[in-house]
Amino acid sequence: MTASTSTSTLTSTSTLTSTSAPSTTPVFPAASILGYPRIGRRRELKKAVESFWAGTIDAPALEKAAQDLRLSTAKRLQGLGLTGNGAVPGTFSYYDQVLDAAAHIGAIPARFGALLDAQGQLDISGYFTLARGTAEQQPLEMTKWFDTNYHYLVPEIGPETVFSLTSTRIVEEFSHALANGVHTRPYLVGPVTFLLLSKASDEAPNDFSPLSRLADILPVYADLLARLAAAGADWVQFDEPALVVDQVTPLPEVQAAVAEAYEYLAAVPSRPALFVSTPYGALEGLLPTLAATGIDALHLDVFKGEVPAAADLAALSGKTLVAGLVDGHNIWRNDLASSAAKLDELRKSGLTVTVSTSTSTQHVPHDVQEETQLSAELRSWLAFADQKTAEVVTLSGLLTDSPSVQPAIDEASAVIAARAAAVGVHRTEVQARLSALTSADFSRDAYATRAAVQETQLALPTLPTTTIGSFPQTGEIRAARARANKGELTQQQYQGLMKDEIRRVVQLQEELGLDVLVHGEPERNDMVQYFAENLEGFDVTVHGWVQSYGSRCTRPSILWGDVVRSQPITVEWARFAQSLTGKPMKGMLTGPVTILAWSFVRDDQPLGETANQVALALRDEIADLESAGIRIIQVDEPALRELLPLRKADQARYLDWSVNSFRLATSGAGNGTQIHTHLCYSEFGVVIDAIDSLDADVTSIEAARSRMEVVHDLENHGFGRGVGPGVYDIHSPRVPGRAEVAQLLETAVQHVPARQLWVNPDCGLKTRGYAETEESLRNLVDAAREVRAQLA
Ligand SMILES: Nc1nc2c(c(=O)[nH]1)N[C@@H](CNc1ccc(C(=O)N[C@@H](CCC(=O)N[C@@H](CCC(=O)N[C@@H](CCC(=O)O)C(=O)O)C(=O)O)C(=O)O)cc1)CN2
Ligand code: MET
Ligand SMILES: [Zn+2]
């Protein structure tokens, strides 16, 4: 459909809205959740998908595994009390929910060539091609989903993109569940969020905005709606989280897009009832806009956001208000008394109100009851996805004024009170150390002074080469750790195997001719969990897997108490690795912000305070590394951008505490100790001032996928310290050629003085195999030598 025909449709819809809605709008279920983890309680989906990629199972077997998982999930949620039509969300995905939307509406970049089958459909192999790329084509870019550790694939849209219904998977999933006794609620990322999250395709002119294609994707969404109605769906959920974020696109344009999209979709003659969800924060200026459309139910995040003003709520008259009361993004048991009070407030509006989660529960593990190794006390403080579902069901009892709710509220209040008083939550020695800090603890001598000392002590060539820390985590390494955890290997045997691995990694780096070496991090299951396991105040889970992207998962640690480092963590490994080489060996730590971002963090004190506790532990670790003869220490902060608040008004305060915690961790280092930091997964333009304020001597940044765009930011900013824009995209097995790397370096030296530049990959190599790693690093070192020679 062209822009002009859609405008005429839009004009006619304003009068049609009331008559074209389903004759009787179905009742929205009193209890529902926005979404549920899809990886499986035992990572069944991860295993099936990776087996399919490895060629050990075929497409029908993968489909069967996914079907079984969907059905057991749906039955479980029914069993927990999500019983109304549409209460169970259809939030399954083989890889990513944004990719799913792209796959349904035909947003398939031309650069992939013909991916559709004879019927114009994208099959499962084509779908994974977009996610994982081919030898010739980079996959879709991956980036952070709002302020979470989930990553989505970025659709590429241009004037040339032809939209059509290229998948009907959500319809088939609905029908399959219905045939098996569960009336689910199909889910798709909504049209406005979809376009706001997209980037312009390679073919698009410079000033192109994906949002300009709104009128062209709406008919495809409409087609899908009609098919879902025909399949019998009562409700469909369009997820619009981009509406809670301050966008680069001016608000009036976003408002116009929201109005156009939902007036259009509401006017579809035969459709399910429309439910729009707006997780991750307060909807603010877009609430009246959505209220003025013909949608049937609107979700508001009233956990993170405020309860809206009465006048704003009044505008929702005739619609169901779905109250996101239970936090989908953290694991603390809900304060039911406070939720009940909010629910009361919302019901005063006279609207039909129902209960839900603030966000999808895809960000939390499945079930606390699996974690039998945790103390009963700690478990009683927690709620994972299943417990959150139960909390939603409990709160929905208030809608019918059920007397059975009060005991549950009282119990939750009692547990929260007990948690505040529990041993280890507040420790006087930690509080005393924090209150004794002065501004001197947050700064080092001037950079020029430090750089001069480091230059003589380290004697590195121009364009020094290094890697980001991890080397491939091989099956052998993981198997050894699994056996050690089961007690099949002694600690000594396990440590011996890890030392063998470190020896191999050091020798490989010597052979390749890298200038600054790493030990490869084989002893770490994860760069955050490893530290959590070695600090007091944290606990870790056994089955608490949460999807980070695609088939990759993490087990976020639980930071519940004041943080204490009772003994050195990395020092012996670093000392051992340094003993194997005359070249500088980097000590490798994870920074305070990232440790917080990738853990479930206590909600009973400001994050900045918790960050400083972690920072003090790292500060002590750095002092011990220095004493052990380590001259370069890298403190990774890949999540610095992730926690940046979605609303501009909150950002300065965040950047202040986050930067300060990094400085607290690192500024005890002597002038001769070179502090590195590393950031990935973000656009850096927005946080470049903050990166500068970290005051690290050297910063490595992801850049290869975006073809060195970051060097413009660095140049404009006048970034004056060492910097290593990544020249090797480690997210795919593709090996970058020597000439390609050299070209990226040549671009870099045009914008950043050569004496500041470092040569390194985009990120750690843990997800890579050895074959491609060796070849890529060889090309990287050769390219650095080539460009060095040109400079000389
Ligand atoms: N926390 C965190 N967030 C992050 C990143 C990160 O590195 N960590 N990187 C960015 C991208 N996200 C990523 C997230 C996960 C992984 C990743 O590689 N995850 C691994 C698991 C890593 C891990 O915890 N490994 C454990 C457990 C491994 C395992 O599955 N063991 C088997 C047994 C193995 C055997 O017997 O062979 C089992 O438990 O069943 C270990 O090595 O010990 C995976 O999904 O496969 C990579 C990147 C952003 N966010
Ligand atoms: C996600 S950032 C990873 C940094 C870490 N040092 C590594 O190399 O794996
Ligand atoms: Zn990284």
Image: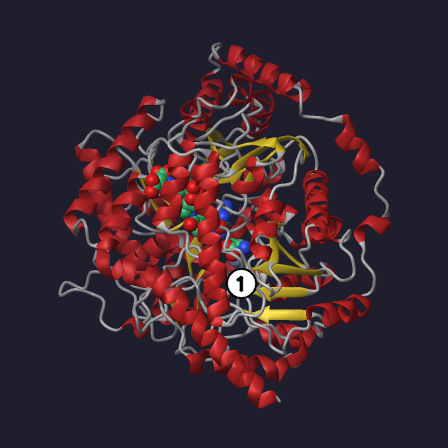
Residue 448 locus on image (x, y percent): 80, 70
784 in relation to 283, above or below:
below
Vertical position of residue 286 compared to residue 448: above or below: above
Q: In which quarter of the image is residue 714?
A: bottom right
Where is 21 relative to 210, above or below? above
**Residue drawn at 37 percent across, 32 percent down:** 488
Q: For the point 59% across and 27% down, which residue is it?
A: 342
Residue farthest to the left? 118
Residue to which mark 1 is pinned: 253
In this rendered view, identify the residue nearer to me: 423 or 94. Answer: 423
Is 2 on the left-hand or right-hand side of 302?
Answer: left
Give the secondary structure at mark 1. Answer: helix
Residue neighbourhood size for the residue with mark 1, other residues' Cα within 10 Å, grouped as few (<14), some (14–19), many (≥20) = few
- Which quadrant of the view contains residue 748? bottom right
Residue 707, position in %: x, y?
Answer: 49, 75
Q: In this view, does 323 lie to the left or right of 593?
A: left
Residue 721 in view of the camera: yes
Q: Mark 1 is on which residue type?
A: Glu
Image coords of residue 171 (percent x, y): 23, 46
